[in-house]
Image: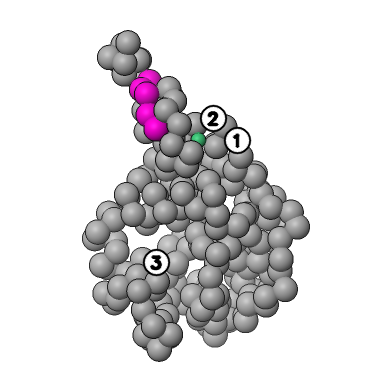
């Protein structure tokens, strides 16, 4: 039975969120029930102001299904899960794009260590999944460990490793930029990115996050 299903591109798998066995397209990861539960949260708490950022939007909270997806996507290096997440947030993200009308949509660059380990930038694949055109304007050259393993002082240093690509500095002047990232935690990364953009004369910076921790 399973052999036939696999030949048809279907297979029996365990849902990464609820653990239930289900039959779906290979690398489906999530059962229909969990997939269907991925919905934007209203109302979201926006009382936390982000410096240099005109406005921001968050899809959901970093818990239950959304947390499982983000975690799996990052630590199991799953492109297909990133694409799936992109599809799930597509409508919500496009609503915000239409509202803010940015000239450029971009995302933070991964440091080399993580890029080598993972092989791809998961936010880039979320954007591909959501059908959003993007441009890479940031770069990094550091090898810091993931932020979660750093203390406050080292975090602050790590954040400074985010840079703009020099060749795009003139181009970014007077542009409205939307930065998309997976997680909003302390906000230090987005504040650094927005500061960089504003300091070279960008018109305004908006931000979109898949989840708020
Ligand atoms: Zn499930």
Tell which residue pokes out farthest to the right in this image: 43
> Residue 21 at what x, y percent from top left?
42, 28
Q: Distance between the residues labelled 1 and 2?
A: 6 Å
Region in magenta: 10-14
Residue drawn at the location 55% of the way across and 37% of the way down: 34
Placement of 168 over or under 133, stated as above or below? below
Q: Earlier in the sequence, mark 3 or mark 2?
A: 2
Residue closest to the eye, 17 or 104 = 17
Residue 152: image location, x then y, percent: 43, 85
Dot 3 falls on a residue whose secondary structure is loop
Which is closer to the viewer, label 3 or label 1?
A: 1
| Mark 2 sits near ligand 1, with its Cβ under 8 Å away | yes
| Front one among 68 and 188 | 68
The residue under label 1 is 36
Task: Quickly name the residue at label 2.
Answer: 32
Q: Mark 3 points at which residue?
A: 109
Work out whether residue 15 or residue 173 is closer to the camera in this orientation and state it.
15
Tell me: residue 84, above or below residue 57. above
């Amino acid at each position: 039975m399973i052999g036939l299903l696999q030949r048809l591109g279907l297979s029996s798998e365990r849902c990464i969120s609820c653990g239930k066995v289900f039959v779906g397209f290979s690398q489906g990861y999530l059962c229909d029930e969990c997939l269907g539960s991925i919905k934007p949260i209203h109302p979201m708490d926006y009382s936390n102001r982000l410096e240099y950022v005109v406005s921001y939007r968050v899809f959901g909270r970093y818990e239950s299904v959304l947390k499982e997806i983000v975690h799996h996507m990052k630590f199991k290096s799953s492109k297909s899960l990133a694409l799936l997440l992109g599809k799930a947030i597509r409508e919500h993200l496009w609503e915000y794009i239409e509202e803010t009308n940015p000239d450029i949509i971009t995302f933070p660059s991964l440091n080399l260590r993580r890029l080598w380990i993972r092989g791809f930038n998961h936010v880039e694949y979320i954007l591909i999944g959501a059908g959003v055109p993007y441009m890479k304007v940031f770069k990094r050259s550091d090898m810091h460990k993931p932020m979660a393993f750093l203390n406050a002082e080292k975090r602050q240093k790590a954040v400074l490793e985010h840079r703009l690509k020099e060749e795009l500095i003139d181009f970014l002047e007077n542009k409205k930029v939307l930065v998309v990232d997976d997680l909003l935690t302390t906000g230090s990364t987005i504040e650094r990115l927005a500061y960089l953009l504003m300091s070279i004369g960008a018109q305004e910076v908006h931000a979109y996050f898949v989840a708020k921790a």
